[in-house]
Image (cartoon, rainbow, N blue to C red):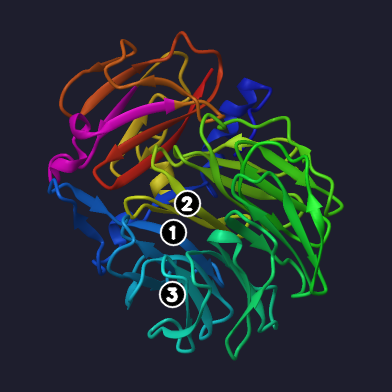
Amino acid sequence: MKKLLLIVHFSFFIFHFSFAQQYGWKNLTANLPDFPYDTIYNSQNEAIVAGLMDLSFISDDEGWVVTSNGNNQGGGAVLHTTDGGETWLVSPVNTTCLAIQMLNQTTGYAGGSSGIIWKTTDGGQTWNFHGTIATTCTDIEFPPQPADTGYACGMEGQVCMITPEGIIMMESNINGAVQTLSFPETKDEGWFEGEGWGMIRHFINGQWVGDQVGISGYHNSIDFVDNQNGWTVGDRILRTTNGYEWIEQTNQPGLESALLDVCFININEGWAVGATGQVLKTSGGGSLWENDPPGTDELFTAVQFTSSTNGFIIGNNKAIYRYTQISDVEEQGGMGAGGHGGVEVWPNPTSGKFQITSTKHQTNSKFKIKNSKLGLVDLYGKSVTIKNNRTIEQLNNETVEFDISHLPPGIYFLRINLENQLIVMKIIKI
């Protein structure tokens, strides 16, 4: 997220250039096809929509996502995209899945509720039994290529090695669930983390080095970029720079609920997602985090970035978003001030009031502003006004007016939810 410009008047003059390479979140949920058990019904005939549980992208555009139907009954699916989530191919799997790791375009592994580890050698078209850890599989991790040996972990302290030939069970001496693991360089050194047991275990050359205790709180995900630098998230964010001493990060917005996954692409740039739609971003190795949510309170289960400007987050109710470049046409719009996807904002920058007008309502009723959900957030993702608040006035079916005279000068983000489409627009208050 771009930092607030200190000289407000200067930001006014360069504003029209800032949209040229604007990046933001694109909602891909509507692109997902039907898949086995994507919606089931409980005994009260209430619909339960499947969740997307884990993802593995090998490039900006090609990746795989695994699904769980919510009650771990029946089966699930592996979804495969080669165009960044615009279209998907579906491959049914006989069990719900919680973890996936693709090694390349053809070979990969998935696991889930039954403890079965599935293997594909045809890019995910078919999945064959490779072995079992006899309990729910929670994570699968392979070190960077060309490694062909990795690890899986699960409930009841289960840890195993995955080889091309099958599964080799390992003695972990852990009583609780092993939630997540990370092997950043080779199969000979990695870290395992447990849910609720407040420690991280270090694995070197086939041996447990020892428990790293004194790590307060609970932790849901761990990620190392090398054998010294790693991060863990849960009810807080911790970092290590030597592989065994952990320091809590002091600037942690968005921790009103648990963080569930973390992903770093180098020692500086990382993202973490949480249970109420939080998406935290850091460009300083975790010393400073900003909340950059896509405008939903959906529970996010996993995040993966392939570069600084391309990434994906997934979660409950088949939610999937992509962080990518938004086109000039979408960002520039009309009125010379700011338009996006059939919605225009004017004036922008503003000293107080601005209007939001739909330009597509004549042909498509879903673009009527009256059907939308509007919200305004600050740089940290904190809501500053919502629809029906006294600061918003409905002028007609196609236009509403915001009054932000009471807010301090700065940069805000307007979020407009129109059915399955999310529009995010930058608003400058001068």
Viewport quadrant of the C terminus? top right
Packing grade of label 1 (10 A; few <14, some 14-19, many >=20) is: many
| Residue holding disc 3 | 82
- Of residue 163 and residue 159, the one placed in the foreground of this image is 159
What SS does tag 2 mark? Answer: strand
Quarter location, residue 402: top left
Mark 3 and mark 2: span between their CA atoms?
Answer: 22 Å
Range of magenta residues: 355-376
* Residue shown at the point (80%, 48%) measured from the top left: 240
Query: Which x, y percent locates residue 184?
Result: 73, 66
Can you say whether 305 is above or below 164 in the image?
Answer: above
How many discs appear? 3
Q: State the residue in front, 352 or 151.
A: 151
Q: How far apart are marks 1 and 2 (CA)?
A: 6 Å
SS for callout 1: strand
Label 3 or label 1, whichever comes before in sequence order:
1
> Which label belongs to residue 53?
1
Disc 1, disc 2: CB below 8 Å? yes
**Is residue 62 in view?**
no
Q: Residue 301 got which mark? A: 2
Residue closest to the far right: 242
Q: Position of residue 54 (x, y in %)?
A: 48, 61
Residue type at mark 3? Thr
Q: Is residue 45 magenta?
A: no
Please rate how many residues cluster around mark 3, counting C-alpha atoms within 10 Å: few if below 14, some from 14 to 19, many from 20.
Answer: some
Residue drawn at the location 59% of the way across and 53% of the way down: 176
In the displayed structure, 265 sits above or below 134; it is: above
